[in-house]
Amino acid sequence: MKIWKQVFSVFIWIFLVAALVSLFVWGHRKVEEKRVLRAVIDRLSADSRIAEVLVTQSRYDETTKQIETTIKFLEYDVDAKPLPPRYFTFQGNIIQFQTLVVRFQDKLVKAGDKARGKSAYLFLKVFMLGGKVNQIYDLTMADEIPGGYKIPGVTNEIEKTLWQEFWKYALDPKMRERAGIKNAQIEAPGTMFVPGTIYTLRIEHDGGIRIDANPIPEIVKGELTGQR
């Protein structure tokens, strides 16, 4: 009888230890989920994420009888740090950027809601329509974590899952309504891109994407063209 009591006591201790370990693992995961979610929300609510575009080459193509334009697309993350630049060449210079813009309900924007007080956006494609061939380049794929929103140091599946849910909220009408999203739509701001100008893409808190164009400062023109 004494032996059975000892065995029973050992069993109870093993059970308690296992329960405590499970509780610790569960609690740690919940804390980690909240940390990652807060970091994602902070990135969605930032208004400093922009992109800049510069024409690096513009020449007349005798073969196609069109202006061939090469642009440098430099996207910035929410901490204003540049991502790796990308270059695209088009047979023409009327270029557009396809974006997914998510606007939240007016009352949330006016109240400065922490998670939903500012519009969110993602660059999807850069393209040019014209003639028999449309030129299209992908910038971000569906269900992909956008480079500008990637949380440094996070390598687990939590962030990936959160972004998959974000795409569902953005594209599903019923989920949008429950999340306080006013609308989610595809926009395609564009303009004529010419040399000597810096083009800045900006997001407005309660609106969409706009493109600001400003002349390149005189002091750097020679540096960019290689002239002295």
Image (tube, rainbow, N blue to C red):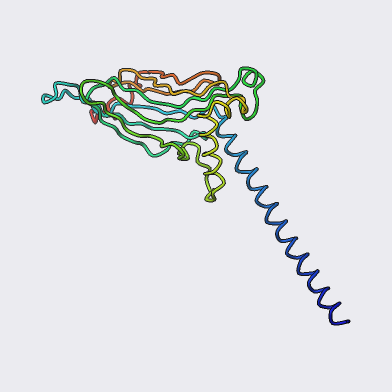
Quarter location, residue 210? top left
**Horizontal relation, residue 70 to residue 160: left or right:** left
Q: Residue at x 37, y 30 (%)?
A: 125
Rendering coords of residue 72 (x, y %): 32, 31
Between 174 and 54, the one lying in front of the other is 174
Rendering coords of residue 116 (x, y %): 61, 27
Q: Residue at x 36, y 36 (%)?
A: 85
**Horizontal relation, residue 182 to residue 228: left or right:** right
Rendering coords of residue 100 (x, y %): 46, 27
- Which quarter of the image is occupied by the C terminus? top left
Between 210 and 54, the one lying in front of the other is 210
Quarter location, residue 169? top right
- Which quarter of the image is occupied by the N terminus? bottom right
Q: Residue furthest front?
A: 1
Q: Residue at x 34, y 28 (%)?
A: 126
Quarter location, residue 9? bottom right
**Horizontal relation, residue 50 to residue 27: left or right:** left
